[in-house]
Amino acid sequence: NDRLRVCPDGKTGSYDRIVPKFQKLVAGRGDKEYYVRGTFTKHNLDFTNDILEMERLGFDQISVEPVVSDPQLDYSIQEEDLPVVFKEYEHLANIMIEKKKAGKCFNFFHFMIDLNQGPCAIKRLRGCSCGNEYVAITPTGEIFPCHQFVGDDQWIMGNVLDGTYDHDMKNRFAAANVYTKEDCKNCWAKFYCSGGCNANNYKYERNILKPHKITCKLEQKRLECAIMIQAAMAE
């Protein structure tokens, strides 16, 4: 955490400051839902240790996700990192199986999968439906398809202060689904990842209809592990 998330002074790590605040927040929510979220980078591919530390700190609803960054940055996840990441996901899955069989285990967001029902059809086809069911509004009123597009003016959809709205852009995002993304058509995981994150696709491939290959492989591996856990618990 402290390598990349520092305080405004540019050098002091934020970990010791934020953890007690998160613990207080979760305690105050009682039985209400929450997720404590972390990010793993090339610098901490042994992220199972981070997840177990979160559990030790009292968190039982956990999401730790791969970094989304410029591939030129030294902490970005590269193709050569995938074998290590895959083994780590398997390691985490095996630990969770042991904990589940012992009667006490945390939830890990990316291993939660409903093989019997799952989300509605439209969610399976286009995920978060950014630019339609979800948008981001800036303090100055600009409308963006989602928060990850904020700051890139080519994606401004309009402005809530002057009433402008780009319906063509809305329709462009509405049409972005697993059937219009060529790489998704023959993928076994398409109805569980819904074509990936459009912002992520654009960040890496400069095209919302072109899924990022590394992200696809990570998602497929997470689904494999999720299925493995369910199979183990059904024995």
Image (cartoon, rainbow, N blue to C red):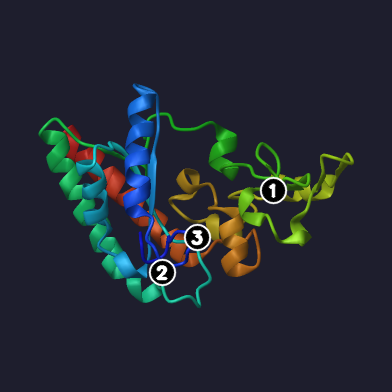
Is residue 23 or residue 73 the one in the foreground? 23
Q: Secondary structure at mark 2?
A: loop
- For the question of whether residue 112 can be seen, the reply is no
- Reply above or below: 75 against 161: below
Q: Residues within 10 Å of mark 3 (few under 14, many from 20)?
A: few
Q: Position of residue 223 (x, y in %)?
A: 35, 48
Q: Secondary structure at mark 1?
A: loop
Residue topped by disc 1: 145
Q: Residue at x 88, y 39 (%)?
A: 163
Quarter of the figure that contains the N terminus: bottom left
Q: Position of residue 25 (x, y in %)?
A: 39, 33
Residue topped by disc 3: 8
- Front: mark 3 or 2: 3
- For the question of whether residue 87 can be seen, the reply is yes
Say what amino acid the circle numbered 1 marks: Pro
- Reply above or below: 58 against 87: above
Residue 209 found in image quarter: bottom right
Q: Which mark is residue 169?
A: none
Q: Secondary structure at mark 3?
A: loop
Q: Which mark is residue 77?
A: 2
- Taking the image as shown, residue 5 lies to the left or right of residue 19, namely right
Tell me whether the residue at label 1 lies in contact with that at label 2, contact meaning CB atoms closer than 8 angstroms.
Answer: no
- Front: mark 3 or 1: 3
Q: Label 3 to label 2, Cα distance in Å?
A: 26 Å
- Taking the image as shown, residue 87 lies to the left or right of residue 147, namely left
Q: Residues within 10 Å of mark 2 (few under 14, many from 20)?
A: many
View extreme (front): residue:
9
Q: Position of residue 67 (x, y in %)?
A: 44, 61
Tell me whether the residue at label 3 lies in contact with that at label 2, contact meaning CB atoms closer than 8 angstroms.
Answer: no
Q: Residue at x 55, y 53 (%)?
A: 197
